[in-house]
Image: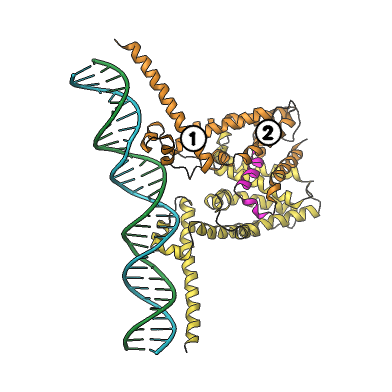
Chain colours: A yellow, B orange, C green, D cyan
Amino acid sequence: MYLWKIMGISERKEREREEMKQLIMGAALKMFLEDGYAKTSIRNIADAIEYSPGTIYLYYKDKDELLFEVQRHAYGKLLEAFKTYATSKHPFERLAQVCKTYISFGLENPELYDLMFIIRAPMNADESQFKSNGEDSFKFLVDTLAECITQGLIVFNDIQLAALQVWAMAHGLVSLDLRCRLKVMMINDVTIRETLNQSMEEYLSCIRK
Amino acid sequence: MYLWKIMGISERKEREREEMKQLIMGAALKMFLEDGYAKTSIRNIADAIEYSPGTIYLYYKDKDELLFEVQRHAYGKLLEAFKTYATSKHPFERLAQVCKTYISFGLENPELYDLMFIIRAPMNADESQFKSNGEDSFKFLVDTLAECITQGLIVFNDIQLAALQVWAMAHGLVSLDLRCRLKVMMINDVTIRETLNQSMEEYLSCIRK
DNA sequence: TTCATTTACTGAACACCATTCATTATATTT
DNA sequence: AAATATAATGAATGGTGTTCAGTAAATGAA
């Protein structure tokens, strides 16, 4: 009997499979960040890792599934940023830190931000999986807002509505800038970051009770 | 001498050229709206108007220039919507109407909204032309806000900052919805429109003095 | 060790895409 | 009627995502 052998081998196989997925994902992430999702082709990724295009399809169903994996990674990075920079004990101050971190994250990782919040969501991805991707980082915002509400620091009663509004404001500012739609206003390119932060701060002072 | 003839002919030619551009633009617009920008190919457009692909390049430099023309058209439609639905004499009420109109426009014309505000701006397009596209509809918002400020109806002093904030909120709400990023919140799909409007209204009441 | 089977991988092929350009057809001018 | 200028073509170029028959290597059973 080779049962002991079989077990060991299948475990190694599983490990190797995971390593291969990581190899592909790593190359994809790097190239998505450098050249953007659209300009990165399966062929390019295959070239980079020195495998044939077909091989990638043995590990990922299609390009969207690859995007999906990269998205998960990106949401993780955002949550990390929140945990690092939004540490104030005071809920409202922490909320301000979350917003500032969000905006910085967007401006400093434009391609990543694109993948996370602007790119058309792959329609084939099942909803539950998609939801779970952004959940954790969104929860950070919700928790902070919940504390603000219970301590009566902001004008909202409904946490969901509060989260929607704050997120929409931050996303609106970042995405309009990333898509160059602010050119219609004549803001100096150098000061744009300052302007966005100022807008966010003003908004936050509006919702403070 | 055939000078009289030359003039007549060159005018007709100019007219025909314009008609041809309109023919292409019309087909492109229709197909962009139905299938989206990415899925509409030059070949498809050529097929639809019963010309060869090459012909389109005699009238438009590339696909981006075509997008550009469609964008101009779309911004015109938005301005029209503002003029139709934001008619209140009272500046703040009018501001609320502008915002409501903007959100409705986005939800009802998702593909158009995409072209206008979400799609990556063609980088080859020169900035001045790009700016002029959105200018008029943006001016409508700015003018309304200016009145609000002079009458002391809102908390802002700076018109630019006010416009940025209001626009960001509206765009944030619409674009997060269009890109399905609100799935992370568990809002009933049917009531989403109501939720967005409610958020906008709450925001407006925050900035009211 | 030998042979059958499973697994991993390849790369050519398919059906698309935007764009270019030599060639052809038509319209205008001389 | 011939020469010229304009308009349109459609095949060709170099890309894209994805599939799949075929090959090579690793594994399992005898």
Q: Write the residue at 50% across / 78% down.
A: A11
Q: Which residue is mark 1?
A: B68
Does the stretch in magenta take in B184?
yes
Nearest the viewer among B152 and B145 is B145
Q: Write the residue at 72% across / 45% down.
A: B195
Q: Which mark is residue B98?
A: 2
Q: Residue A189's quadrant in the figure? A: top right
The crowd level at tag 1 (other Cα within 10 Å; few <14, some 14-19, many 20+) is: some
User: Can you give x and y, in whole percent of width and height, for residue B93 in the image?
Assistant: 74, 31
Which segment did they paint magenta?
B167-186
User: Can you give x and y, in whole percent of width and height, for residue C24 in the image?
Assistant: 25, 33
Secondary structure under tag 2 reads helix
Q: Write the residue at 60% across / 32% down.
A: B78
Q: Relative to B170, say whether A141 is above or below.
A: below
Question: In whole angstroms, how far apart are the C-alphas of marks 2 and 1?
Answer: 24 Å
**Residue A86 visible in the shown view:** no
Does the stretch in magenta take in A77?
no
Amino acid type, mark 2? Val
First in sequence: mark 2 vs mark 1: 1
Locate the N terminus of chain B by quadrant: top left
**Residue A69 visible in the shown view:** yes
Nearest the viewer among B30 and A137 is B30
The image shows a total of numbered marks equal to 2
Q: Relative to B196, say whether B138 is above or below.
A: above
Q: Which mark is residue B152?
A: none
Q: Is C27 on the left or on the right of A88, as rendered?
A: left
User: Can you give x and y, in whole percent of width and height, for residue A106 in the image?
Assistant: 58, 50
Q: Residue B4's quadrant in the figure? A: top left
User: Can you give x and y, in whole percent of width and height, for residue A23 in the image?
Assistant: 46, 65
Q: Is B39 on the left or on the right of A174, as rendered?
A: left
Amino acid type, mark 1? Phe
